[in-house]
Amino acid sequence: MIVCKGARELDRMREANRLVSRTLDLLGTMVRPGMTTRQLDAAAEDLILGSGARPAFKGYRGFPASVCASVNNQIVHGIPNEQPLQEGDILSLDVGVYYKGFYGDSAWTFCVGEVSPELRKLLDVTRESLYRGIEQVVVGNRISDISHRIQKYVEAYGYSVVREFVGHGIGRFLHEEPQVPNYGEPGKGPRLKPGMVLAIEPMVNSQGPGVKVLEDRWTAVTADGGYSAHFEHSVAVTENGPWILSNSSGRTRRGTSGPDPVIEGGEE
Ligand code: MG
Ligand code: MG
């Protein structure tokens, strides 16, 4: 069953997602060579607990940390550890909180120091594919209109979308119906109605779409060793179009800092 939220519930979901966004903003300022993902996790947990919220992922089916930290060939669900980040790494951070009865969920891939132009491009295309998907969050569209747009945009650059993990509804539960895949034919699945909230989260691999899960039973990595990027927003369907509940003024469609990325080709 898909649960639609009323105006007051959406306001509360905005609060939860605003905290997620503030957490990612904070972590983004900390990401640098030498920093460990354990340190980032601790900072996130301090901010979330200090704000009267609870980290949503900690203890979720036994996950041992407050954020997921996935480096380079890791796709999602990486466990924070003591290994220092290195110049040129990419780091996907996924943050979830539970606040006043509702969940917030958002992810962003950051550059560690200077990153190669090839990897920067992977990040630019993945981030842009999220926003292309969000543009499809229009009353009357169907779920797979989002999926299709993301896949089409990503594959135009020769990258591939992960199939094993998908976006999801979100609200009083972290994962609600419907599922929001990042691939598929348009015009399928439930119609979008005002009050639906969707966590849209393309995971994009630089090479093939294949996935392996490591022995820790959490960390998902690319099967072929390619790089992977992950961007996620929680988005409400409204009569006035998409409302990005996890928006950040610091991290935008155009990235985190510096000049706008050049995204050639791949247009429809
Ligand atoms: Mg997430
Ligand atoms: Mg999610």
Image (cartoon, rainbow, N blue to C red):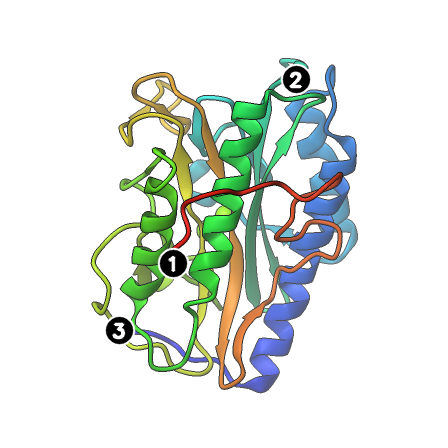
Task: Give the numbered dot on residue 168.
Answer: 1
Q: Read off the residue under disc 2.
A: 85
The number of numbered badges drawn on the structure is: 3
Asked which secondary structure carries label 1, the reply is strand
| Percent position of residue 19, x then y | 70, 57
Q: Crowdedness of circle 2 by 10 Å Cα count: few (<14), some, many (20+)?
A: some
The CA distance from mark 3 to mark 1 is: 12 Å
Of 50 and 201, which appears nearest the observer? 201
Q: Read off the residue under disc 3.
A: 190
- The residue at the point 60 percent across, 66 percent down is 245
Give the foreground label among 3 and 1. 3
Asked which secondary structure carries label 2, the reply is loop
Does ligand 2 reach within 8 Å of label 1's beta carbon?
A: yes
Relative to 109, is 239 on the left or the right?
left
Along the polypeptide, which appears first: circle 2 or circle 3? 2
Q: Crowdedness of circle 3 by 10 Å Cα count: few (<14), some, many (20+)?
A: some
| Percent position of residue 173, x then y | 45, 63
Does ligand 1 reach within 8 Å of label 2's beta carbon?
A: no
Along the polypeptide, which appears first: circle 3 or circle 1? 1
| Percent position of residue 142, x then y | 29, 72
- The residue at the point 27 percent across, 42 percent down is 163
Along the polypeptide, which appears first: circle 2 or circle 1? 2
Look at the picture and state if 166 lies above or below 36: below
